[in-house]
Amino acid sequence: MAIPSNNNTSPSGEVHSSGLERAWNHLVEGFAALGTVLICVLMLIICADIVARNAAGASLPLVSEGGALLVVTLVALQLGATVRAGRLARTEVFIVPFSQRLPRAGAFLNGAFDLVGAVTLGMIAWASLRVVEKDMAASEFIGVPGIATLPTWPFRVLVLVGFAVAAIEFGFRVFRALRAVRRHT
């Protein structure tokens, strides 16, 4: 969803975005695409593990630990695009009729929801920064030494960036909600 600016509309009413906004949109969508690629990687890993269990009677190394890290990572990477699309779970049964009946109060309530989301995800990103620092300092890894290991910090960095992007996207929604409150004054 584009953040409309004051004079960026064409005669047909289309909103034109700035170069910075387009770059941000590409970044958010790029993270979502990376999350989709990681879903495919996870499916391939799980299928390979199933084949290995049936063919050799043993699981592949790193599948359970790597799968757990991948799930958290892909959720974090796709969260910003989910926020932008307005696809987070909320009580649409209440907020839609409420916003139609009382547009200013509805915009305020949506802004409050988005502010809570921005603060919460910002705190998660901030806490993730310490996890990344610890993982890098301690050379944390998953797996069994001598068989197969994988450093955890790349996954943690992607989780940190994914939550930070989602927090910023919530912040944009707060500003849009504030504009909507002023518009309905």
Image (tube, rainbow, N blue to C red):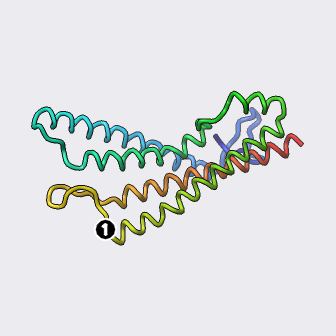
Residue at left offset 36%, top offset 72%: 137
Q: Nearer the viewer, residue 74 or 56?
A: 56
Q: Is residue 152 above or below residue 57?
A: below
| Amino acid type assigned to the residue bearing label 1 in the image | Ser
Q: Please state, as top left, top right, bottom left or bottom right, where the C terminus lies in the image.
A: top right
Bin the neighbour count of mark 1 within 10 Å (Cα to Cα): few under 14, some 14-19, many 20 and up.
few
Residue 88: percent from left, percent from top:
59, 38
147 lies left or right of 126: left
Q: Quadrant of the N terminus?
A: top right
Is residue 19 visible in the rendered structure shown here? no
Residue lying at the far left in this picture: please name it: 56
Horizontal side of residue 61 vs 112, given as left or right: left
Residue wearing tag 1:
139
Q: Secondary structure at mark 1?
A: loop
In depth, the one of 2 and 168 nearer the eye is 168
Q: Residue at x 42, y 47 (%)?
A: 72
